[in-house]
Image (cartoon, coloured by chain):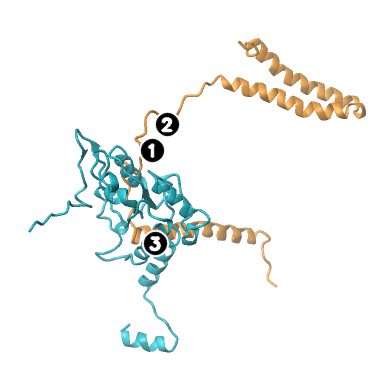
Amino acid sequence: MDEGLRSELSKQGIFTVKMQELLQWGYNTSRKNSIWPLQFGLACCAIEMIATSMARYDLARFGAEIFRPSPRQADLMIVAGTVTKKMAPQVVRLFNQMPEPKYVIAMGACAISGGPFKQGYNVLKGIDRFIPVDVHIPGCPPRPEALLHAFMTLQRKIDSDLLTGPNRARHLDSEICGEYPLPTFGEHDLEPAFNPEVWHPPVIVRE
Amino acid sequence: MPEYSPYLFLAVFFAVALGFGLLPLGLARLWAHKFSPAKPGPQKNAIYECGLEAKGETPIQFKSEYYLYAIMFLVFDVEILFLLPFAVAFLQLPLGASIAMLVFVLLIVEGLIWAWMKGILDWT
């Protein structure tokens, strides 16, 4: 159907849609309105995460109030807090054990960069070194409104997921593996220190 | 009005019930085949234990002797269940009912004697 006929029909009150678009709309709409987060707090950001799910901020408005204590039933991991190097393999394993589709919100300064512990020896400088993070929220800790904003951002991202084609959503691509390699405890640092598939060290340009 | 078999609606009901269950499963399978590939993996299929690697065996050993306590519980439980209404209605009961109850109690007591001889009742 060409665009001219389509717009002509829509002027008459007849809306046409491709089957694929309809399926994609239904799929994305139903998924984005029922995100079940993993009940998983690492540090003080978890308190803000709890506050977000409680009556005052009411995460249930986004269909995401059901925090699951098992990765088997969760499709969103909120990395809420400081990820120490000792904890990092467990975080990655939990992420690997979640079924597809799965999303990650890195909540707070520690989860996105190491935060105030960035210069320390035992804190991971951002969980995005090992798993693909969809939304980063800055803040120490971020307010519940910031987490709600992250939810809305994630919903917009899910809404724009494509069903087919080369740019289709990560979980629909059979080429992309759902499991990410686990770091192991090395002599001085985690080995490998980052996953080159999801993160590259920034290139410092000095003039 | 045509004649229907009185059981025809059962067949229709069964077919609809089967379809109601199988149709979503079939659609989900079709969706997985067309769009969403399964992505199993060694870690995803592993036993879930809070992010840690599972240690030890999943099937735990349970002392099989505990079945004796279950039997003893059953003996006394069934006994009290039937003896209490029997005792309440004792004066109105005919002789036959009392004898039947005696046989029943004897059957139960047989289990108790068996357990006694086996030495389960010694709480040491």
Give me the chain that's orange.
B
For the image, the number of numbered tags is 3
Q: Chain of mark 2?
A: B
CA–CA distance between discs 1 and 2? Answer: 9 Å
- The amino acid at mark 3 is His
Left or right of residue B22, residue A82 in this image:
left
| Horizontal and vertical percent position of residue B116 | 67, 12
CA–CA distance between discs 1 and 3? Answer: 34 Å
For mark 3, does the 10 Å Cα neighbourhood hold few (<14), some (14 to 19), or many (20 or more) residues?
some
- Residue ID at (68%, 25%): B74
- The amino acid at mark 2 is Thr
Cβ atoms at labels 1 and 2 below 8 Å apart: yes
Kind of element beneath mark 3: helix
- The circle drawn on residue A41 is none
Location of residue A120 with respect to B98 vertically, above or below: below
| Horizontal and vertical percent position of residue A98 | 37, 48
Kind of element beneath mark 1: loop
Nearest to N terminus: mark 1 or mark 2: 1
Tag 2 residue: B58
Q: Are marks 1 and 3 on the same chain?
A: no
- Residue ID at (42%, 82%): A15
Tag 1 residue: B47
Give the image quarter of residue A204.
bottom left
| Horizontal and vertical percent position of residue A5 | 34, 87
- Residue ID at (35%, 42%): B45
The shade of chain A is cyan
Kind of element beneath mark 2: loop
Tag 3 residue: A149
Left or right of residue B19, residue B102 in this image:
right
Can you tell which of label 2 and label 3 is closer to the viewer? 3
